[in-house]
Image (cartoon, helix red, strand yellow):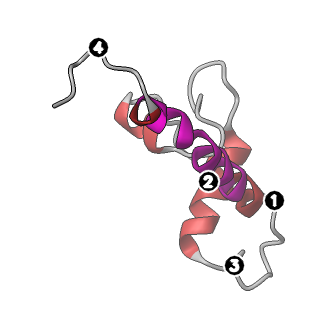
Amino acid sequence: MHSITSSGPSDLRPIRCIPGLHLGYEWFHFLHHLPPTSWLGRRSLVGRFRRHHELARMEKGNFSVSFPLWDWILETMLED
């Protein structure tokens, strides 16, 4: 039985997620800069992410430059 204060390999689980989160961020950012005529660039979801990225002014809204989920949750998403 493990105590709450035990230290060991299981304590590193949150740190192990960081590379995956960073790769996910980089992938979304890469999608924003694809040519709109490319196969992935023509997808509607990629188009929405691209518009959100282009509108990112960081003065009044669109603070989450690459992934609009947090702007939607915090109601800081700017309209087109």
Q: CA distance from mark 4 to mark 2?
A: 31 Å
Residue carrying label 2: 24
N-terminal of the two: label 1 or label 3?
1
The quarter holding residue 63 reads top right
Q: CA distance from mark 4 to mark 3?
A: 47 Å
Residue carrying label 3: 40
Residue carrying label 1: 33
Amino acid of disc 2: Gly
Amino acid of disc 1: His
Q: Quadrant of the N terminus?
A: top left
Residue carrying label 4: 5
Q: CA distance from mark 1 to mark 3?
A: 11 Å
Residue at position x 57%, y 60% in the image: 48
Q: Find residue 74 and report its horizontal and vertical position in percent.
A: 38, 28
Q: CA distance from mark 1 to mark 4?
A: 45 Å
The answer to which of 79 and 54 lies nearer the viewer is 54
Q: CA distance from mark 2 to mark 3?
A: 16 Å
Q: Nearer the viewer, mark 1 or mark 4?
A: 4
Mark 2 Cα shell of 10 Å, populated few (<14), some (14-19), many (≥20): few
